[in-house]
Amino acid sequence: MKKKPLAAIREGRELTPREKLWLIVSLSVPSILAMLSATVMFFIDASMVGHLGAKASASIGLVEATGWLMGGLGMAASMGFAVQVAHAIGANDLKRARRVMRQSLVSCLLWSIFISIISLAISRPLPYWLGGSEEIAHDATLYFAFIGVFGIFYQMEGLAGSMLKSSGNMKIPSILNIAMCVMDVIFNYLFIYVCNMGVLGAALGTGTAELITAVLMLYFLLWRSDLLAIFAHGKERRPKGWYQFWPSLDVVRNAFHIGGPMGLQHLLMGSAQIVTTVIVAPLGTVAIAAHSLAITVESLCYMPGFGLAEAATTLVGQSFGAGRRLLCQSFARMSAYSGIVVMTLMGVLMWVFAPELMTIMTPVDEIIALGTDCLRIEAFAEPMFAAAIVCNGIFVGAGDTLRPTMMSLFSMWGVRLTLAALLATTYGLTGVWMAMAIELCFRGIIFLARLYHGGWMKKLGER
């Protein structure tokens, strides 16, 4: 194709169904490969820790959900600015896109420092708040504290990657994320085994990989990006003073309107994950370890969904910015269908190979058996989980975050946690996973209903 289909969005040209599908595939495949590689590498990391024993796995598993919560708050801030950039590029207003990008750097850096301070402050009592025992509390505290400090690098890496993806550049962030995963495994091996640092080594290895990747990601954004670079494309793009990086009210207000609901969603969804951990913790060390490792295995299934969601965010975001309602709707539905098909296949594979995947994670037979049961329950929820993931990416691209956030929170707190608390008393950890599967199916159904209702496009005209 001589003309780039992505440029056609902001140029107002029509796209054939083949071009639309090609855009979805070409933008999602790099992200899917990066996320799958991240999952495989995290898989290896968890296996490294798992072979240190059930206590080591449990110490990380205990605070893992809280770490996700903190990371989710950082991601919400990044997306609040990245969606604005996608809309500006779709409207062919590249000057505004670069203005928003500059201000996001300072805003997100300050936000990440605040999150790191909070993480350090709560790291010592956190394991006890979550119901952890004395035997795993020390390692859990060290792991969470160091991951919290390194969260600054995670924030800046994620922000730069989101900006590049919003401009349609999926390749560079994906390559760098794959490289980060490789470095993560190498550094973890060195710190865990060569330096004999155990659980702390896992945190140091991950943090070192994030630092290197953040530097590289910012380089490609600020010096090499065709649309967003400000230091290597002529004097007209270079900021006239450092004051141009300082956040302005209009940009921050828009970022808050988009990212605020997402931040609330991550806060309350992350809190729900923590409550789930509290429900699981009394079931014992084996249950905590099986729960944590099974979640890692399951991520092999849902990472393709997140890759498609990222592509949908970019395509819907630029179509939205260009004011092209029908194109927006077409990208949304094609992305959702693709996600359901891919994750249904992944769910089948997870059901079949669950025992083998758990065996990779740990040599403990009780953990393998319990984790296998949980994974086979969750496999049935993967199609609707895909619908929820991809639809959320679609809504984010349109800047429609408040209503989906409320829907997610109702689903998590009203369905999952209620059922988990009831079923755990009778069925143990498998009861918790039954609750998860039921809730994911419910969430997928209500998200599909919103997708077809079209309320997320209400700000667009009839173009």
Image (cartoon, rainbow, N blue to C red):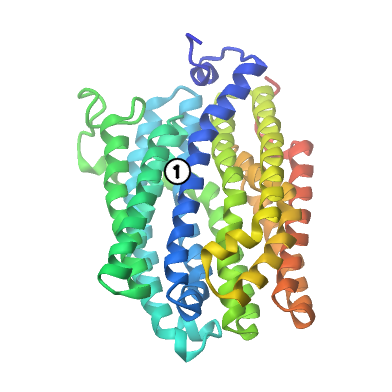
Q: 448 above or below 296?
A: above
Camera-side residue: 306 or 194?
194
Residue occupying the point 42% across, 75% down: 52
Amino acid type, label 1: Phe
Please state if 219 lies on the left or on the right of 139 as rendered. Answer: left
Q: Quadrant of residue 375?
A: bottom right
Report the residue marked by disc 1.
81
Q: 449 above or below 264?
A: above
Camera-side residue: 412 or 41?
41
Q: Quadrant of residue 461?
A: top right
Please state if 131 lies on the left or on the right of 154 as rendered. Answer: right
User: Residue most toward the top?
Assistant: 2
Q: 407 above or below 1?
A: below
Q: Provide the secondary structure element on which disc 1 rests.
A: helix
Q: Position of residue 105 (x, y in %)?
A: 33, 47
Q: Position of residue 29 (x, y in %)?
A: 53, 34
Residue occupying the point 67% across, 33% down: 332
Camera-side residue: 326 or 273?
273
Residue occupying the point 32% across, 42% down: 217
Q: Position of residue 71 (x, y in %)?
A: 46, 60
Camera-side residue: 444 or 264?
444
Dot 1 alpha-carbon crowd within 10 angstroms: few under 14, some 14 to 19, many 20 or more: many
